Image (spheres, rainbow, N blue to C red):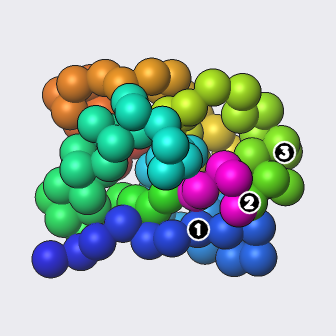
Amino acid sequence: MAKAIEFNDANFAAEVESADTPVLVDFWAEWCGPCRMVGPVVEELAGEYEGKVKVGKVDVDNNPSVSMKYGIRSIPTLLIFKNGEVVDQVVGAVPKSVLQKQLDAQVA
């Protein structure tokens, strides 16, 4: 089963901005309670959308460049990229169904 990929300042451009499939990126931190609620959902989505959507996470504490580039001010923030552009965004802990609906719109 696919797992969420660890994106970072070094691999973000290659893994996300140059991806040929939609990408879901979870901006999170270890100390963030709501992030820990969203984490397992992100892992489930990685498995469910394997081959259709690339799913990964960015630890904002360790990767300030990417976090600043996309204006991440509160976490968790989930961005959906398509063709290197942000096409959707969710801030805060949301139900899995919300993320599925947004991903389905990009895969269709």
Q: Amino acid at mark 1?
A: Phe
Q: Distance of mark 2 from mark 3, alpha carbons? A: 10 Å
Query: What secondary structure do most residues of the magenta stretch adopt?
Result: loop
Specify which label sits upstream in the sequence, 2 or 1. Answer: 1
Q: Position of residue 77 (x, y in %)?
A: 54, 33
**Compared with residue 104, is residue 8 higher up or lower down, i.e. above or below?**
below
Q: What is the quadrant of the C terminus in the image?
A: top left
Q: Which residue is mark 2?
A: 63
The amino acid sitting under disc 2 is Asn
- Name the residue tied to disc 3: 69
Can you give x and y, in whole percent of width and height, for residue 1 in the image? 15, 77
Query: Do the residues under discs 2 and 1 have CB atoms within 8 angstroms?
Result: yes
* Picture disc at residue 7: 1
Query: Which residue appears at 70% of the width and 62% of the height?
Result: 62
103 displayed left or right of 14: left
Q: Magenta segment, which residues? A: 58-62
Tell me where residue 34 sits by quadrant: top left
Mark 2 or 1, closer to the camera: 2
